[in-house]
Amino acid sequence: MKRSRDMAASLVFIVMMTLSVALVAGFFGALHPALDSFSHFRIHLAVLMAVCALPLLATSFRLQAAAALVFAVAALATASAALPRPWPVQAVAKSTDQTDQVVYSLLQMNLRYDNPTPKKVLSLIGRTNPDVITLDEVSAMWATELGYIASAYPYRILCPYPNGVFGVALLSRRPFVAGTAPHCELRGAMAIATIDFGGRSADVAAIHLSWPWPREQYRQIGELSEQLSSLGQTAIMAGDCNAVPWSAAVRRVAALGGLTVMPSAGSTWIHRKLPDFLRRYAGLPIDQAFSKGGVTILSSTRLEDTGSDHLPVLVEFSLRPDDRLPHDEHESALAASDLQNNPRG
């Protein structure tokens, strides 16, 4: 009996150590995209490692198990912004001088190219009535469906992907700035438009990245460097990055555009055959928003399922006057940092 317990403990120890190697690899994602692929599963790996460590505390592996638990907790702390929460999360602006500013909204959606319920998407757009919409996986079917809301969102640009499936789109109720023209990245992975928000202009961008290594995500980010660096002084960008906010890939995107990554709204993706509940609590937070300059992110909320394998994300933001632009780019996401500090029930 004792021998069986020792063998079981040894097996669990081997599994725990294997998980720890994968977890450590993810922290070195900047060295190679293969290592960065592990970072996307940091929460899952840390939880599984902790589960393995707990029973080992009562065995001869207790010291190793204790060390693994400490490491798992530390790893979870680095991804705490995306950990599941039992309540809706909203950010509250710190500065009182923001209270008189107009609040705008951006709806980020990966539509799913073969979504069987497109009317759910159009209904959600009608109910939330966002100022701008960033869309991913805009297939030929969606080009037709989006035509039904052309009168509500007359300012738009659709950027087809070469395979006709994974294009992006940007829709706006507010006009494009006179003398500017929206434009697409050649392969349809990014759309940019300069939009007039009540006399203040801001660049708005939609982005859709490929899957991580061994797929082409790393190379694609390099190809998008010119578009990212072309974003104006004040900009907001959102999209399906197929990468978590703490990954080297997302940090690279932010650095190329001079952008700040918004604190995560939480998990937004899981395989579509799994239930929505699991997507919210065990999925991956891969739909990101970025800002720079005069944009202040005020809140970020995941919305209900609309037939895609991604959850929509509604972002509220305001624009500071030009004479109050931040000296530090990180100030542009100051209000969003209150997602953790000042949640409202």
Image (spheres, rainbow, N blue to C red):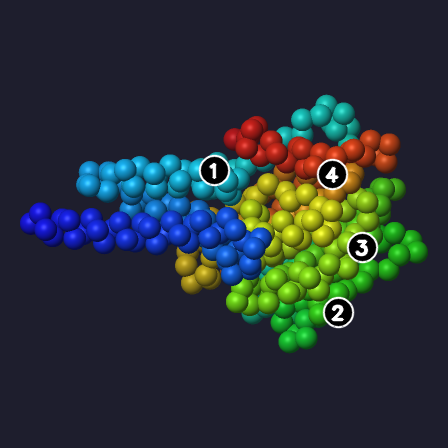
Q: Is residue 341 left or right of residue 222?
A: left
- Three-letter residue code for mark 2: Leu
Nearest-to-viewer mark from 2 and 3: 3
How packed is label 1: few (under 14 Cα within 10 Å), some, or many (20 or more)?
Answer: few
Query: Mark 2 sits on what residue?
Result: 186
Q: Is residue 186 above or below residue 26?
A: below
- Indicate the position of residue 243 as horizontal and vertical percent values: 56, 55
Of residues 312 and 30, which is closer to you in this image? 30
Query: Mark 4 sits on what residue?
Result: 329
Q: Earlier in the sequence, mark 3 or mark 4?
A: 3
Q: Is residue 22 left or right of residue 290?
A: left
Disc 3 to disc 4, how far (Cα)? 16 Å
Q: Is residue 161 above or below residue 110?
A: below
Q: Earlier in the sequence, mark 1 or mark 3?
A: 1
- Three-letter residue code for mark 4: Glu
Secondary element type, mark 2: loop
Query: Mark 3 sits on what residue?
Result: 230
Disc 2 to disc 3, how far (Cα)? 15 Å
Query: Mark 1 sits on what residue?
Result: 77
Query: Seen from this angle, which residue lies furthest bottom?
Result: 163
Query: Seen from this angle, which residue lies furthest top?
Result: 96
Is residue 136 in view from this perspective? Answer: no
Q: Is residue 111 left or right of residue 106?
A: left
CB within 8 Å, label 2 to label 3: no
Q: Is residue 341 above or below residue 165?
A: above
- Three-letter residue code for mark 1: Ala
Disc 1 to disc 3, how far (Cα)? 34 Å
Of residues 169 and 74, which is closer to you in this image? 74
